[in-house]
Image: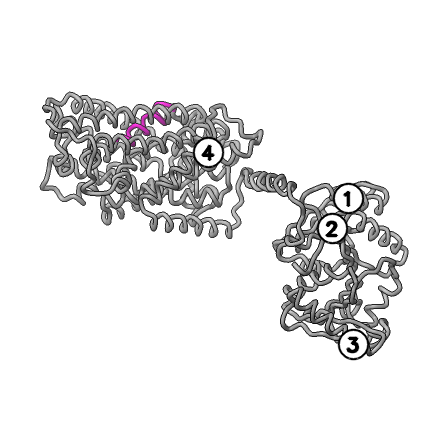
Amino acid sequence: MTAESGHKRSLHVKKFGTFAGVFTPNVLTILGVIMFLRLGWVVGNAGLVGAVAIILLAKLVTLCTGLSLSSITTNIKIGAGGAYSIISKSLGLEAGGSIGIPFYIAQTLSAALYIIGFTEAWLRIFPGHTPLLVSSIAWIGLLTVSYISAHLAIKVQFLIMTVMALSLVSFFATPAAPVENSLMVGMFEDASFWQVFAIFFPAVTGIMAGANMSGDLRDPRRAIPVGTMSAILVTTVIYIGIAYVLNQIATPEELRSNQMIMVDKAFWGSAVIAGMMGATLSSALGSMLGAPRILQALSEQGTIPFSRIFKAKTSKNEPRNAIILTGITIEVALILGNLDFLATLITMFFLITYGMLNLVVFIQQSMKIISFRPTFRVPRFVSFLGALGCISIMFLINPIFSIVAIIVIISLYVWLEQRELQSEWQDIRGGLFLTLAERASRIAMRFPRHQVTWKPDLLLPVDEPKIWAGPLYFIRNITHPSGSIFAFTVQEDGSEAARKDLQTLMTPISKEGILVNSTIIQDDSFLHGARMVMQTLKGITLRPNILFLTLGGDKEKDPIIGQLVNEAGKQELGVALLRQHPRMAFGMQKTINLWLRDKSPNWHLAVLIALQLQRNWHGSINLVSSAQEKAQEKHLYHFLERLNDQARLPVTTEFHVIIAPFPDSLKIAPRADINILGLGEKLSFDAIRQAPDYTNSTCLFVKDSGFESALI
């Protein structure tokens, strides 16, 4: 099917407005099984004050979440899947999937919970019927309605809304006389405050029923905020009203022991039973509409296995394959399920989803980015309070289960990240970490750069990216794991081709997990451009601290290298000048000869680089010094031992003092894969080129910036 035909099909799909698509399913899901079968038990344990506190606390969480949901849906074009779509478009498919999968499970189990509630009401009238048979027949009926059409389901919900209204009128018109000693403050005889809260909380989780239908709404940006907030406010009044009446007309013992107290005390009990059946069926139907659409949205982005099967939709926008799988899962839950256990399990999953939704909004508010400009604005403390409240309540209800749930989500995130999912949209992750880095930079600017936090951050000039044959793996071994590289090239035209060549050149190092930045400087002089780079970078917080150069066979470039070394000193950069042996290269990458002179001020950077190589090569270090006279041998050994101790070098480090002129010392030094030497104030390029021939190895010449210390 072409994109054009798909677009035409979407135009002919009848979609829902605010009342039908959001308010009605939200209200009917919220006023469900918990209200009829457990609210009396809540009042009997908590008393009126405690019950109202539980209702308001639960509603506070959903109010904050509803406000956050309303805010973000007026900022982005929300797709199918409700909360999954929002989180995915904000934090990426991995985060969306890690939350969306448990959220789908929660919605699916909710349907089972509501069908069990319907069964309990049915058995009140027909106590001889088999519970599982009743549940299964109700399941088949609901599955049939949801399978045929969402529009049919919405029409059924309108009928149920009328029955619900009649049942509430019948209850509030109760002829029961007030009890003498109503319970204002409960003793929590059956369960603790948080256990009672956990069982009650699914009663308020219906705020996502409308958002889950986001792909079927005409105008989600308007419908979700208006419908959601209206449903929260209306149902809050109803719940508190029912709690007040129950506390007036029944004793605590009746409330705790009689699940059908609302039926027994109503003006017309049959109306309440009808309302109970209707509400539970409607809530189940709402979940059976929402859950498959979450599954379909997960599949549409390839987030879950068998996505090709479950992402399919009919011409009328019905995800029937997803409906079938959801229906099967519900039936399994009905066979195995327990009402209170399911309620607690669902509470955890919903709290995680709500917490993440609030967190997404809080993050975007905190970033203060121009792209976050919702038409429905809420204060930042609302989303923060919602996120904090969800996390806190989770651990207060059940700390162990909370930790397990978080581990499951992290595991899902890692699994999804390994699948390298490709989304059709951009998300805020890059901007989020950039914002964090910028704020960290502002804090870092208040403090001097301490030697104790030194790490290798290389400035790497590349003359011709397409033909540059520098030692990338060696550069990796100097910087891994915590260092970074800033690579640049200077081109007269600053062409896009050169930029791509440079990026391609640095890709292998980037894949090693090393932070790599690269840029093109447009200038007709390589030296002038390189100087501009060094001078500019000196003023930033996260700046390089080592200028890395290579010395080849072209002597015409020697003056440029000499001036770059001088400029590095002015800009407080250390220098590492590599002269690679044409045949031996880096040998076995095991042994490092570190040449040191007593009383030389230029050895800290050499020691630090040697340690980096030793760690990444899993090799050994030889401390080597040269003397003209035998009389100096003992003193130099003592110097090397003292430095070894102060610099905390590996225990395998060996000391070598060679009595010979320096050029001869290079020839008779211990065999090594690289020799690290100091770079003098006056550069002798001839001597630098000769050193690899003398040592039969690659040589690295190093010069301190004055801001390193190997003794810390």
Question: Pointer 2 and pointer 1: residues touching (CB < 8 Å)?
Answer: yes
Q: Position of residue 152 (x, y in %)?
A: 30, 29
Q: How is the image coloured?
A: one colour
Image point (33%, 27%), residue name: 232
- Reading the image, the residue beneath label 1 is 533
- Three-letter residue code for mark 2: Leu
Residue contact between numbered discs 2 and 3, judged by CB atoms under 8 Å? no
Looking at the image, which residue is at 57% across and 31% down? Answer: 369
**Magenta segment includes 28:** yes
Query: Is label 1 in a helix, a strand or a loop?
Result: helix
Extent of the magenta region:
17-31
The percent position of residue 362, horizontal first and vertical second, equals: 48, 34
Counting from the top left corner in percent of width and height, residue 34 is at 24, 35
Magenta stretch containing residue 33, yes or no? no
Q: Looking at the rendered structure, which numbered label has been put on residue 79?
A: 4
CA neighbours of label 3 inside 10 A, class few (<14), some (14 to 19), many (20+): some
Residue density around tag 1, few if under 14, some if 14–19, many if 20 or more, within 10 Å: some
Q: Earlier in the sequence, mark 2 or mark 1?
A: 2
Q: Is residue 221 above or below residue 394?
A: above
